[in-house]
Amino acid sequence: MKLYPELVENHAELSQWRRGIHAHPELGFEEIRTAEFVIDKLNEVGIEVHSGLGKTGVVGTLTKGNEGKIIGLRADMDALPMQELNNFDHKSVFDGKFHGCGHDGHTIMLLAAARHLSQHAEFNGTVNFIFQPAEEGKAGAYEMIKEGLFEKFSVAEVYSMHNHPGMKVGSFATRKGPMMAAIDRFDVTITGVGGHGALPQHCVDPIIIAAQVVQALQTIVSRSLDTIQPAVVSVTAIHAGDSHSVIPAKVKMSGAIRYLLPDVGVLIKRRMTEIIKSSAEAFGGVGELAFRDLGYPPLINDGACVEKAVRVAKKIVEDSNVSFDIEPIMGSEDFSFMLKEKPGCYICIGSGKANQRNFMPHHPEYDFNDDIIPLGASYWVKLVESELI
Ligand SMILES: [Zn+2]
Ligand SMILES: [Zn+2]
């Protein structure tokens, strides 16, 4: 691996920073302490700071050399609302809050790169270091964009990186086009006519309708979609009734759909509406479908930016350890909002330790692998030096 020596020399200090954030996790839009840490570190090396964008988001701006391109590098800062089960010294000091996705590490890798670029690197142009809040389900990226992120910081391209314990340290992986799925959360209400469980002829049983709807929704993927298009329709909650002898008047159901192409999402939503409405009508009831705001769009990488990112990764690790055609992932990621606005590339950085069990993100015993801090930061620095020439 070809790492920047200064980043390797500072590894212990950077790990210390990371563990400090790990021990003090903050949930989406509550990243006060984390944002202050980021602001302090950026200020220390003379990087101009803009804070409070998207509530707790921070942007650092560094310009060097002749006027050149402007790019954005993005890290996420938030933790998960879950209990950590680790027992090491830097475990979370807060019950029910845990850096279970490695955003503590993402923050530090970008901070390390910012400090290095400020102190040691030569380039021509401007880098905006985007530290966003609330990636986990609360669309912090969308919030920053809504508050003018790309008007205030007009980047030509935007890049991001996520640790991946399923890939070994020293590897990178990405793909052109759709890489991660959209998610839209839905709620269904089936309204019938309640009554005595012994006299169903006087009722419209919404539970019978709901049972039909759940089955029929599964035919969207198996019968309405192009068979090579990945998509998931899941009903994950059903609530109705509270007695053995009363037919309830309503059933409420919730769930989520996931897909890789926007057109597929449109088709799924249309078929859901038809199935829910007409199934309910066929039995004399009423079916209603509502999608919640702030679904995440599919994460779609720009082809040219993927090529740039792959070239950069190959300058740091072995060519054979950089994959540019991994299979798409049906999980979601709110960097997709930034990629809807600007061309860019999201890349996975391998963080799996050799010869030991590696817990995946969102597992209660997961921990970010500090070994990759100089590597991830080197990728950022090399990307800037290669792009801003
Ligand atoms: Zn996560
Ligand atoms: Zn994450």
Image (cartoon, rainbow, N blue to C red):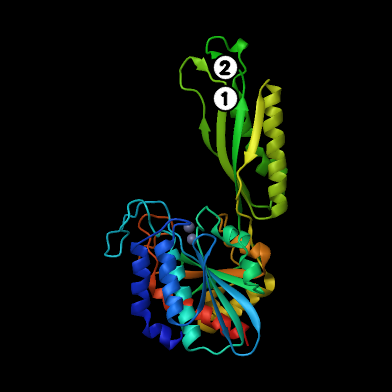
Q: Is residue 170 visible?
A: no
Question: Would residue 25 be seen by someone viewing this image from the given angle?
Answer: yes
**In the rendering, which numbered label is found on residue 250?**
1
The mark found on residue 71 in the picture is none
Label 1 environment density (alpha carbons within 10 Å; few <14, some 14–19, many ≥20): many
- Where's residue 58, x and y in %? 51, 68
Residue at 65% over, 32% down: 288
Marked residue nearer the N-terminal end (2 or 1): 2
Q: Which mark is residue 194?
A: 2
Above or below — where is 210 with respect to 104?
Answer: above
Q: Secondary structure at mark 1?
A: strand
Nearest the eye: 229 or 194 = 194
**Horizontal arrangement in the rendering, residue 206 relative to residue 113 (left or right):** right
Disc 2 packing (10 Å; few <14; some 14–19; many ≥20): some
Q: Secondary structure at mark 2?
A: loop
Residue 170 versus residue 56 in the image, above or below: below
Q: Looking at the image, which residue is at 47% across and 82% down? A: 46
Q: Amino acid at mark 1?
A: Lys
Residue contact between numbered discs 2 and 1, judged by CB atoms under 8 Å? yes
Q: Amino acid at mark 2?
A: Gly
Q: Is residue 190 above or below residue 145?
A: above
Label 2 CB sits under 8 Å from any ligand 1 atom: no
- In the image, residue 10 sits, relative to residue 169, either above or below, namely below
Horizontally, is 99 left or right of 279 in the view? Answer: left
Q: Is residue 303 left or right of residue 358?
A: right
Residue visible at 54% across and 20% down? 248
Q: Where residue 112 sits in the image (x, y, percent)?
A: 44, 78
Image quarter for residue 388?
Answer: bottom right
Where does residue 119 sit, x and y in percent of width and height?
47, 87
Residue 266, position as x, y percentages in the image: 71, 47
